[in-house]
Image: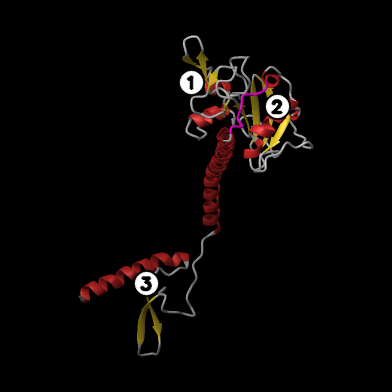
C-alpha cells in the first residue's frame, strides 16, 4: 500500500511540473500548505471543497479563443443555410396542404347541401379574367363553406397578370386569383401580399372543377379542387380513362415545374403543387422552382 501511495504522489508531482509552464496546477494535484515550522497538511488543489487564497487561475490563450471561434463560424456557415432552407420548405408545404384541404372540405360541404352544381355555360365558354356569373356561382356554391372568405375589391397585387383576375381571400390570408376557361382556374398565393410572390415559391396553380363537367375530366378521388396537371381523360365512347399530361409521371411534373418547360402549351411552374403532393407533401432536393 505504501508503495502505491508513493507512486501516486510521484505521478501527481510529474503532472504538476509539466503544467507549471501554463501557470495552471493540474486538477487533483497534491500540494502542501505550511501551517507551522513543524507541520504540513496535504490537500488536493481544485477540489470543490477547498479554497486557497493563493490559488492560480487558468485561462485560454487568445490563439485558442480565435481558433475556437473560427471553427464555430465554419460550422455555422455550413449548417445555418440548410436549416433556413428546410424551414422554408416546411412552411410552404404546410400552407399549401392547408389550402388544398380547406378548399376540398368546402366543396364536400357544398355537395352535402346540394349547392355544388355544374357551372353556368357563361363560365365554361368564357375566357374572361373576371366574369360576374362566376362570382355569383361561387357566392352560392363555395363561399358559404369557406369561413371568413371574401372577394376583396381594394387589393392590389404586384403581379399584373394576376392582379386583373377575380380575387378571393381566405381567412388565413391566402390570396387566390380566379379566371374561367372550361374550368375555373385558381392561382393561390399562400403568403398573400407578402413576398416573394413567385411561382412555385408561394404561388401555386389549381383547378376548381365540377365532376364530369363538359371537359370530360375526372380527378380520381383527389377532389374537385386539385393541382394543375392532375387529371385523367374520360373517353365517353368506350368509357375508358387515359392519363393526363402529367398524371403519375414525375418526370413531366419536374419539367412543367421549371421556369422554362419543354411544352409551350403548358404554363410555366404549372405542376409545382402537383409535384409536392405526388412526393408525399414534401419538397425534395430536385424541386426546381426554389433553385
Residue holding disc 1:
249
Label pair 3/1, CB-CB below 8 angstroms: no
Viewer-side residue, 187 vs 170: 170
> Where in the figure is residue 31, as x and y percent of width and height?
38, 77
Say if 69 sits above or below 240 in the image: below
Residue holding disc 3:
29
Assign a secondary structure to mark 1: loop
Secondary structure that dominates the magenta span: loop
Assign a secondary structure to mark 3: loop
Look at the image and say whether residue 119 sits in the magenta stretch: yes
Label pair 2/1, CB-CB below 8 angstroms: no
Question: For the point 66% across and 39% down, which residue is it?
Answer: 170
Look at the image and say whether residue 122 sits in the magenta stretch: no
Q: Nearer the viewer, mark 3 or mark 1?
A: 1
Residue holding disc 2:
134
From which residue to which does the magenta span run?
Answer: 114-120
Q: Crowding at label 1, few (<14), some or many (≥20) Cα neighbours within 10 Å?
A: some
Residue closest to the far top: 237
Q: CA distance from mark 3 to mark 1?
A: 71 Å
Left or right: residue 215 versus residue 122 is: left
Viewer-side residue, 285 vs 240: 240
Assign a secondary structure to mark 2: helix
Pick the quarter of the image with the N terminus: bottom left
Question: For the point 63% across and 37% down, which residue is it?
Answer: 190
> Where in the figure is residue 70, as x and y percent of width and height?
55, 49
Amino acid at each position: 500500500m505504501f508503495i502505491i501511495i508513493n507512486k501516486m504522489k510521484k505521478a501527481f508531482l510529474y503532472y504538476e511540473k509539466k503544467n507549471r509552464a501554463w501557470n495552471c496546477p493540474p486538477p487533483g494535484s497534491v500540494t502542501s500548505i505550511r501551517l507551522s515550522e513543524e507541520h504540513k497538511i496535504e490537500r488536493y488543489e481544485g477540489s470543490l471543497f477547498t479554497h486557497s487564497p493563493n490559488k492560480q487561475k487558468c485561462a485560454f490563450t487568445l490563439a485558442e479563443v480565435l481558433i475556437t471561434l473560427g471553427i464555430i463560424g465554419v460550422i455555422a456557415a455550413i449548417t445555418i443555410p440548410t436549416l433556413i432552407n428546410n424551414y422554408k420548405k416546411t412552411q410552404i408545404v404546410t400552407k399549401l396542404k392547408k389550402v388544398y384541404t380547406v378548399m376540398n372540405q368546402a366543396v364536400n360541404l357544398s355537395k352535402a347541401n346540394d349547392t355544388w352544381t355544374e357551372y353556368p355555360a357563361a363560365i365554361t365558354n368564357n375566357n374572361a379574367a373576371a366574369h360576374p356569373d362566376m362570382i355569383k356561382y361561387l357566392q352560392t356554391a363555395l363561399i358559404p363553406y369557406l369561413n371568413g372568405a371574401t372577394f376583396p375589391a381594394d387589393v392590389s397585387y404586384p403581379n399584373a397578370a394576376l392582379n386583373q383576375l377575380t380575387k378571393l381571400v381566405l381567412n388565413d390570408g391566402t390570396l387566390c386569383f380566379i379566371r374561367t376557361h372550361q374550368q375555373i382556374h385558381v392561382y393561390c398565393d399562400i403568403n398573400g401580399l407578402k413576398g416573394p410572390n413567385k411561382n412555385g415559391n408561394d404561388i401555386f396553380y389549381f383547378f376548381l372543377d365540377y365532376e364530369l363537367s363538359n371537359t370530360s375530366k375526372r380527378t380520381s378521388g383527389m377532389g374537385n379542387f386539385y393541382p394543375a396537371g392532375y387529371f385523367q381523360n374520360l373517353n365517353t365512347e368506350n368509357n375508358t380513362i387515359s392519363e393526363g399530361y402529367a398524371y403519375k409521371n414525375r418526370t413531366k411534373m419536374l419539367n412543367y415545374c421549371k421556369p422554362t418547360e419543354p411544352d409551350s402549351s403548358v404554363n410555366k411552374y404549372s405542376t409545382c403543387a402537383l409535384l409536392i403532393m405526388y412526393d408525399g407533401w414534401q419538397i425534395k432536393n430536385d424541386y426546381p422552382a426554389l433553385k
